[in-house]
Amino acid sequence: MNIIVCVKQVPGTTDVKINKETNTIIRDEADAVINPFDEYAIEEGVRIKEKVGGSVTVISMGIPKTAELLRETIALGVDEAVLLTDRAFAGSDTLATSYALSMGIKKLGSYDLIICGKQATDGDTAQVGPSLAEKLGVPHTTYVRKIEEIKDGYIRCQRMTDDGYEVIEMPLPAVITVVKEINEPRLPSIKGKLKAKKYEVKILTADDIGADKSLCGLNGSPTQVIKTFTPVHEINGEILEGTAREQAKKLADKLLAMQFVKCR
Amino acid sequence: MNYFLTEEQQMIKELAARIADEKIAPIALEYDREGKFPREIVKYLADSDLCGVYIEEKYGGLGGGVLEMALVVEELSRACGGISLAFAGTGLGTFPIILFGTEEQKSKYLPDIAAGKKLAAFALTEADAGSDAAGIRTTAVADGDHYVLNGTKQWITNGGEADIYTVIACTNREKGARGFSAFIVEKGAPGFSFGKKEDKMGIRASATCELIFEDCRIPKENLLAREGMGFIVAMKTLDRTRPGVAAQALGIATGAFNAALKYSKEREQFGQPISSFQAVQHMLADMAIQIEAARCLVYQTCRHIDSGAKNISKEAAMAKVFASDTAMKVTTDAVQIMGGYGYMKEYPVEKMMRDAKVTQIYEGTNQIQRNIIALELIKEST
Amino acid sequence: MTGIEIISDKCIGCKLCLKACMFGAIDMKEKKAVINDNCSLCGACVPSCKFDAIRIEKDKAQKTVDISEYKGVWVFAEQKDNVVSQVAFELLGEGRKLADALSAPLSAVLIGSNLQDQAEKLIAYGADNVYYVDHQSVEHYNDESYTDIFVQLVEEYKPEIVLIGATTYGRSLAPRVASRLNTGLTADCTGLEIDPEKKILLQTRPAFGGNLMATIICPNHRPQMSTVRPKVMKPLEPDYSRKGEIIYPNVIIPENLKVKVLDVVQTVCETVSLSEADIIVSGGRGLGDAKNYALVEELARVLGGAAGASRAIVDAGWVDYSHQVGQTGKTVGPKVYFACGISGAVQHLAGMSSSDIIIAINKNPDAPIFKIATYGIVGDVLEILPELIKQFRERLN
């Protein structure tokens, strides 16, 4: 079974500080990491491979130094790592990203299953998985928390919903996006790391994958950011003074008076 | 500081650190409280190839030596000095096989240990044989193709949890120090059972247990080296594992120092963080100096041993004494810096202080280590 | 030529843009900013430059669609078990404002079976008309069939704006539909507005973990699509005397689907769910220890509410992720929200700031949570919570 896992490089922390005066990001030397949700995707891919055989290829679209992170996935049981990198890809929104990934994946040849993390921690959009499936013309299921059965041309999985789950079956090839309930990603092994050290990530440009540059990057992105600003959350509330007991009483008085809290 | 580790040693250290931070730290207090054995941590070590860092590649290990073992022990001990013993205690039980095992013995036992499928333990101590190992009462008597063991071993690290035990027993009372022999005993051998599990002050996540041999029959091929070599096996093994105890102490000290440093920056008294007070600053500086000195001594001793040096007893003892005394001092000071919080079980440093104590006691008390050092010094100078 | 350009005459080498760049993509060379290979054209540097020295340009978009043909605002009326989800009514409330600003109709899209009453309810909540696709086979949500039908409707009726709830289904349907239509989609919008001159949709959403807000447009493609999380927008008061039209569109119902939903299992039947609770009591780091979360749960129980948590204590493993409130957890908008020992990181505020009444309990009087609190108590949460539990327990019985 040929499994492709899509991954993204994201900043190591979402705890970004903003300089209120200049309205700019205070940049710590936060390392870039693989999107944490994608680690579950990699783990699931490797587990499927270990069970039914085949290969796992990770693919990413990003800046050249993403290759370093992709190389490390080899230590987790990944067989091949491919990076799509080109100035033409810069400024991609989720549509342009999906297009580039779809062209990259078609270039790789045949595949059975594509696994993505449910979303990336930097944008939290959760759009690339379904959008990619559409560009490839294959079915998809989001928020997969368990694969019940997978075999040639068939997958049956559980999609997490707000109040439980659904059991969904699809023919392969297909795309799934996975939630962190699906597994516990393994740590790398030393032997894996030694193998990764020697591995060379395959680099592909827009031309290499035959991408139409008008559909890539900023050109291929229907959405544009026109403004960024620091969120303002400010109202002037009332501070309740006194001892702990007095404070608690004052608050209870107010809430009961407003009838937000009612007697049963 | 640059410790001049090779790229592979650096990898080993980093991976052990990840396991310590991500897997051990969150459970350390619970395992200490409940005295639980860390099976799942062994699994993480195994899956990461760390179980076999000091075992030859042909037996599935990574081909490293004492330094690689110490790096792992140090990092794991930073998070829990008890949990790290599942690994370190296995090293202690395995080194007799590495040093004295036949090809058959090595290929039978080492691959499973390297793969983390089996743990090992080393059984020397008895009720009346601590610092004075000559008091060993356990006997092994040859009977046809077998040896028959009788006696009780006490305070055995990994006891009950390990699958492979190297046991020192008396084969000939009359020959004195030359009357002891080393044997490999597998869990499940007839007549081999476990006694009580000890309730300890520290290293509570480590299993410490009695081993009971009642007409325990083991095949003759389980004899390590030759009859009468038991003492040598034990001493040569301990020379190689004392830097492991030193690394354990070093890790505990580092963990306590990190906690105290972090706390001193967060805790405010008199309107400022306590790290701004000179009294605290000097304590932190002293702790850091001792840890750094211990680390340099431990790593250098490991390199000395791994270089194939013949005389290593003095150096191994020095590393063990210095690192374990450092651990006791640093953990005590960490509790002091953290004050009332440091004394509470909700915070990790009181546990580290309890864990540190044993490193001054086991694998040869620090008093015995000083004897070894002094005797070597005198011997060298004559 | 597409790309980013530093206008070197204007650049004075002030380095403000370096700090603004998340990607380390700007270097200084000879006291001028220079863009390196790390640039993702995210645009964060453009507003940071006080001298207008940074320009991002793209090639003239190939206009494949005549955007003037697209009119009206649509809301996807997600339904489950023949009941339209609350988020659809919230979106109608917001959609009404947008439609009025455009002088265009507001429509709901309803897919399912036996939903006549629900269609009427959608009108009461502000829809001018309802496109109702009524078929037994689409009774339950299915990515494949719903995408096919939705795309047919868009192609036939050409709405200029489509709003979809950012639910499990909505977050699966919206990107698939947008991808097939080759249009833009902005996820998890917290603010929607019509640009009064250009008449285009201004979509505002949190970026970089909620620390920055970004306003996003989709100028040359239609429809302009947004998803919005539940509890972010407010529904209108229903008016059952409102008149509206129910339209039964002629669409091809897809057959022989590849994606089959075999079973729907409900597992959560615990106390009150976070997203539906009127009262939420949430705990954060200030609780000091995992075991003190019991106080939070106890107050929630006494008040008949739900217990929430900050990301910090979920990450620390004190409570399950299902309790997490915030940008990466659940967005909630209860009547009363207690933030106990939560400092109020932006990412937490993004998930609860639409609550009617916010009560902040924190030791640190400078904690950002006090800035949005209706009532603040400066004190040790471990002392205040037991008192509150006592007060409410006595006075509610």
Image (cartoon, coloured by chain):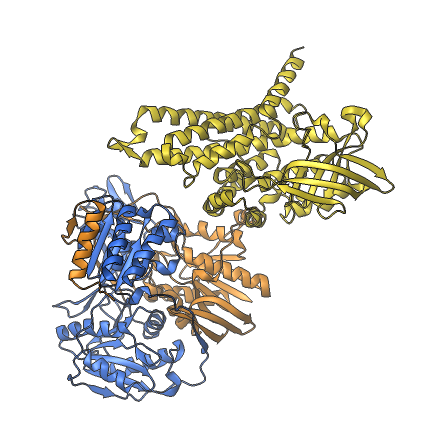
Chain colours: A orange, B yellow, C blue
Residue A133 or residue C226, whichever sits in front: C226
Identify the residue at image location x=32%, y=82%: C111
**On screen, B44 above or below B135?**
below
Residue B116: % across, % down:
62, 47
Left or right, residue C10 beside residue C386: left
Residue A105 or residue A123, whichever sits in front: A123
Residue C64: % across, % down:
27, 74
**On screen, A251 above or below A261?**
above
Q: Is residue C194 visible?
A: yes
Residue C39 or residue C268, whichever sits in front: C268
Residue C74: % across, % down:
24, 77
**On screen, A30 above or below B178?**
below
Residue B319 or residue A206, whichever sits in front: B319
Q: Is residue A232 visible?
A: no
Left or right, residue C128 beside residue B266: left
Task: Pick the quarter of the image with the N terminus of chain C.
Answer: bottom left
Residue B284: % across, % down:
39, 27
Identify the residue at image location x=54%, y=61%: A47
Which residue is outermost to the top?
B382
Which of the 4 quarters of the picture holds residue C394? bottom left
Task: Pick the quarter of the image with the C terminus of chain C.
Answer: bottom left
